[in-house]
Amino acid sequence: MITRELELYHGPQHLGMVGNFSITLSVEGDTIVEAKANPGYLHRGFEKLMEYRSWTQNLTLPCRINVVEPDSMEMIYMMGVESLARIEVPERAQYIRTIVLELSRLASHLFGAWAYANMLGFDTVAQWAMAYRDFVLDLFEELTGGRVYHIYMCPGGVRRDLPDGFEEKVMNFIKTLADHVPDFDAALFENKLFYKRAKGIGQISRQEAIELGATGQVLRATGMAYDIRKVEPYAAYDKVKFEVPTREDGDAYSRLWVIHDEMIQSAHIIMQCIENLPKGKVYERTPNPFKWKIPKGETYVRIESSRGELGAYVVSNGGKNPYRIFFRTPSFTHGIPILEKLLKGANISDVGNIMISLYVVPPEIDR
């Protein structure tokens, strides 16, 4: 039987896509023969923009590279500046940064659960996930004044100390979320329909994942327990105990379970930081921001974002502005080479399934 090959455009308006991401598909029947990813032109040019702004003016730009998880982008830029300027961050600020990063990870994972559940038709779970994410944003609003972009971190620490009663509110949220984990499990993660839709879909081996530059859940879902928070601790991650969740099959089912388990670990990290939060100052004073010149040099720093290894290469020529900034984002490899590979031979109905399980955020690609 001879079938005709057709070219279809999937996204950006499709429910299974995110942002303005789209994919050009060549199909025979309902089987994908070839896929070409198009991340579009969203939030572009940040790295170049940062070369024309002062070190302090740039505090507002990195967070916009990943709207879903802005705090990791803030953190990586601050670490780059602190590395070049040889700034020591106070211990209390390191603990607060860890709390903020893990709250941001929870918000990101809840957003991912919303997107995935919504795409598969689990509307109740999607609404639960988005509601709990809003509770996290409430905490951020009280802490920073902003719900989406926080710009709370600064070179040398954080902008201000925690408000009165904030630790108690965070602990209450963690306990409330923990009480509802069985509901999430019963409605989605242990649901037979989720198993049938995700098991074996978008499968990648550990060797292929390593060769293609996979990181985060995509890599850990193949059984490799690799996490920058363990390999190269930063902030207060060397002061807390947590596990690195893994699965073995490297498919969409495994990737979602890794995300599920990571939320539980994030809750444990936050609780430990609050219980052991040291006293002291929350920032180290820096020079006049309008005249601040960072010593000449270059550095590469990295952290574990909710999507995997996030790195920043920062170069200073001794001036008031960065000479060069480059961000190494996990969505770049997940959203182009890995996505295109996994879509080949897949069914059209699983395009969104695979895309969202890879945790792709388009602005991280086209930056």
Image: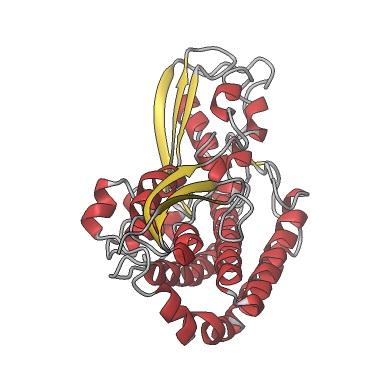
Question: Which colour assignment does the render follow?
Answer: secondary structure
Residue sitting nearer the eye, 322 or 154: 322
Image quadrant assignment for residue 198: bottom left
Where does the N terminus fall, quadrant-wise? bottom left
Residue sitting nearer the eye, 237 or 114: 114
Res. 330 in view: no
Looking at the image, which residue is at 34% across and 55% down?
Answer: 344
Count all numbered tags in the image, as a single digit: 0
Q: Position of residue 211 (x, y in %)?
A: 24, 47
Residue sitting nearer the eye, 111 or 155: 111
Res. 160 in view: yes
Q: Position of residue 284 (x, y in %)?
A: 60, 35
Q: Position of residue 146 (x, y in %)?
A: 76, 49
User: Height in image: 137 above or below 253?
Assistant: above
Q: Is residue 215 left or right of residue 16?
A: left
Where does the C terminus fall, quadrant-wise? top right
User: Height in image: 310 above or below 17?
Assistant: above
Q: Is residue 247 left or right of residue 51?
A: left
Q: Position of residue 196 (x, y in %)?
A: 42, 80
Extreme residue in the left direction: 207
Image quadrant assignment for residue 137: bottom right
User: Height in image: 138 above or below 40?
Assistant: below
